[in-house]
Image (tube, rainbow, N blue to C red):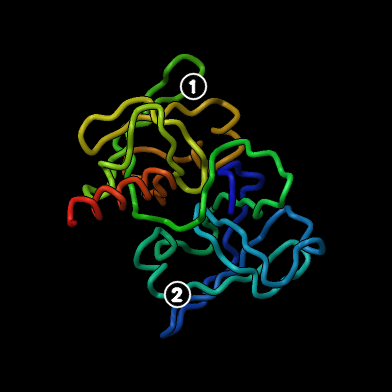
Amino acid sequence: MFSGIVTDVGEVRQVQRGAGGATLTIVTAYDTALIALGASIACSGVCLTATALQAGRFTADVSNETLACSTLGDWREGTRINLEQSLKLGDEMGGHLVLGHVDGVARITGRRPDGDSVRFSIAAPRELAPFIAPKGSVALDGISLTVNEVDGETFGVNIIPHTLTHTTFGDAGPGTRMNLEIDLIARYVGRLLDARGAA
């Protein structure tokens, strides 16, 4: 479980592809001596398991399913990614409950200044758009964000200067693909309504 508060921007150092998926080596500023083998780390919104640890880096295995359903299939050596370690009991919940289970891939369609912030327009996959509501929460590349407005399958978010500087959003622009996780509550409400409609 995560909160969508990015605590490091890491970098993909190596991608090894095989028939069963891929193995990623990721450089991080985290003190890896304090990370347990098998720990969960959100990598641009995707919960991955640390399968090997060295000073300043960790390795994670990625299935073909994850490569196909997220942006991880696009990652190359040098790709910058948002990192967050899993929550511990008693940790501050600064964002919202984020599982690290990506629902689909969204795409930035616009970027413009909005005061000291930057306003982004995001196109959601059609099947996920009904789960996104004004003033609700989404996670984009692992970043907990509040939705400003919704217009069909497009929604808007405001990114403050701190987030631009301390996440990969600063490099993002029209055409950038991002991992999208809808709000946990919206997911279950939608499932409940589907079940009632089928009854």
In this rendered view, identify the residue nearer to me: 12 or 2. 2
As helix, strand or loop, the secondary structure at mark 1 comes to: strand
Residue 60: percent from left, percent from top: 59, 71
Residue shown at 51%/36% (left/top)?
170
Circle 2 crowding by C-alpha within 10 Å: few under 14, some 14–19, many from 20: few
The three-letter amino acid code for the residue at tag 2 is Ser
Farthest residue toward the front?
A: 199
In this rendered view, identify the residue nearer to me: 108 or 47. 47
Residue shown at 33%/47% (left/top)?
106
Report the Cα–Cα distance between label 2 and label 1.
36 Å
Farthest residue toward the bottom?
A: 19
Q: Which mark is residue 117?
A: 1
In this rendered view, identify the residue nearer to me: 143 or 115. 143
Seen in the image, is 53 located left or right of residue 172?
A: right
Farthest residue toward the right?
A: 33
Residue 99: percent from left, percent from top: 51, 54
Seen in the image, is 199 located left or right of residue 43?
A: left
Q: Quadrant of the N terminus?
A: bottom right
Give residue 103's quadrant in the image: bottom left
Give residue 7's quadrant in the image: top right
Residue to which mark 2 is pinned: 63
Residue shown at 21%/47% (left/top)?
126
Farthest residue toward the left?
A: 198
Residue 31: percent from left, percent from top: 79, 57
Which of the two discs, 2 and 1, sits closer to the camera? 2
The three-letter amino acid code for the residue at tag 1 is Ser
Q: In this picture, is 88 found above or below 135?
A: below
